[in-house]
Structures are given as structure tokens and as C-alpha cells.
Image (cartoon, rainbow, N blue to C red):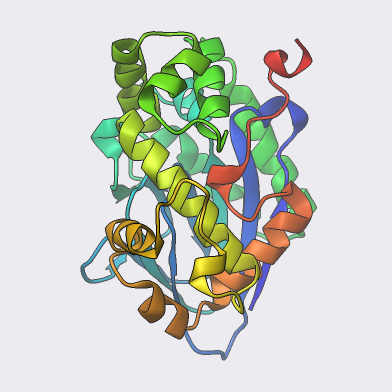
Amino acid sequence: MTVSYALPAPALRPYVSTYSLTIVEPDTPTVFDQVYPEWPNIRMSVGGDMAACTGPGPLVDCNPICAIGPTTHATHFSLAPGRYWSISLLPLGWARFLDLRANDFADYWEVIGEDSPFKDFAPLLECDRRHQSLPKVAARIDKHLLAMLDRPAHREEVIYRAHRALLDPEVNSVAALAEQTGIGVRALERLSLAVFGFSPRLLLRRQRFLRSLAQFMLDPSLAWIDTLDSQYVDQAHFIRDFRRFMDTTPSAYAAQPHPVLWAAAKARTEIAGKPMQVLQPPSGFISDEE
């Protein structure tokens, strides 16, 4: 099994973090793993069979292309031999590509059909019909998504500021997040639900947890106490968050094999500089140059 990453075209980088290709070789066992909470994704199978479930529950078929909204629970999944693509959307991408409230699709996924609100992503399936290289397929995905940028932009500056503030480990309260964004707390709450999918308080809690989990993913030999974010009071505080977001305990999680996640964390860090989508800032936006 291999996991490879590519960055989107520069014009897409405020909206899309990465493209990834996971290949499970023929005549090998089905791979099982679970992915931490993250921003929305479009996932595709090419000649394979994928199933998933966000939160506790049985795995359900999600072929050949599905959309996953923003999540605050781990998504369990299985991958039979085949090729699997993931297009990782950032909050600006959700706002630009989709005229949907993110909280209506929180912790939710669906197979993309003719009547799906995500149907404009369905043509992405045609990008990898010939099993070509990652750069060639990524260029085709770029072309489709660049055409989708023709849609009108709404509130992009404030979404960008909110996202950057959320990534700042020094921002540890809703009031501080609102101040850094430059809007009032109530306006932030409305924006947060509509574009990010969850309340500001829950997003800050998720971010704190994922900063800690990322340390463990990059070095599983670490003790959990050595991965804790500075915002945690003690290890019990972290364990409560772990149960909330991963639906398991740290020890149970560490005891399980994570063939996809470990490979993905290293490959993603090499290409994008961060092991997780939720830790990657939107780049290329005009405010980067201000």
C-alpha cells in the first residue's frame, strides 16, 4: 500500500489543501483504518471498494465517489485493492464551491448521485480512468476545480481571517478568536456554523486536540503526555477530548494498526508541510501579501 500527495494549482490553494492517492495493491488484504476529524473531503474509488462510517457504527459502501462534510468524530474506513483519491477542501473551498450551510452536513457523508448537492464534483471520476500518474491526474482535477472558481465569492476575507486565527495556538477562547477575526462573537458563531460546520468553542477544542494527535502521528514512540498541547491542563483533560473526538481511548487507539494514517502523515508533511489537513493554513489568498 502506498500514499502519495500533490498540491493543487496555486490559484486553488486558498480553497483546497491537497490531493492524495492511496493505492492498495492487487491480491493484498483489505486495509482498515480510521481518520481523525477534519475539514470536508471528496473521496473517489477507481477499480476498488471503499466503505466508511463517521462515528460509531457499521461501515457502509461509499463508491464510487462520496462527499464528507466537516467532522468532529473519527471516520472508520476500509479499502479493498484499488486506487483511492481524496480532494481535501478548506473552509474557503466549501464557501466558494458549495452554496450549502456546513453545519447541515457536519459529521455526515453521502454517495454523490444525480440529485446530490455535491453533484458538480461527480465529473472528477473521469480524471483517473486510465490509471495515470499522480501529476497527470492532479492536473485534470485542477482543471475541473479551476472552472468552479467562476462562482461568486462571499465573505472570503473574513473566512480567511477566522481560519488563520483558528490555527493560532495562542488563540484559546471564543472572544480571542472573534477579536482576531475582526467581528463580534455572535457574528463569529453564525459564520462558524455556516462555513466551518461547528460552533467556535467546539472548533477550538478540536484544534487543540488535533495539534496533540499530530505529534503522536509523526512519532508513535512518544508517550501521550509528551504530545499534549499547551492548552491542556493535564492528561485527564486530553483523554476526555480523545474520547469525544475519536470515540476510543488513547491506549486503545495506539494499540491498533494505522497503515494508512502513518503513511499519510509522513507523505503529507513532505509535500504540504503539515501532517493534517486541519493544521494547514490556506495559502495564496490575497491577505498573504498584505
Residue at position x 21%, y 68% in the image: 57
Residue situated in front as seen by the camera: 251 or 82: 251
Q: Residue at x 64, y 71 (%)?
A: 219
Coordinates of residue 120 in the picture (x, y in percent): 45, 33
User: Where in the figure is residue 164, as x and y percent of width and height?
Assistant: 58, 27
Residue 270 at x, y percent in the picture: 77, 57
Residue 100 in sight: no
Left or right placement of residue 201 versus residue 260 in this view? left
Q: Residue at x 30, y 31 (%)?
A: 199
Seen from the viewer's position, the closer of residues 170 and 28 is: 170
Horizontal side, residue 154 vs residue 9: left or right: left
* Name of the residue lying farthest toward the front: 233
Q: How many marks?
A: 0
Q: Is residue 220 left or right of residue 30?
A: right
Considering every residue shown, the one lying at the far left of the view is 57
Image quarter of the C terminus: top right
Q: Nearer the viewer, residue 213 or 41?
A: 213
Residue 108 against residue 31 in the figure, above or below: above
Along the viewing direction, whichever of 221 and 29 lies nearer the viewer: 221
184 vs 19: above or below: above
Q: Is residue 104 above or below residue 280?
A: above
Is residue 251 at all visible to an observer of this figure?
yes
Where is residue 184 shown, x and y percent of the image? 36, 9
Quarter containing the N terminus: bottom right
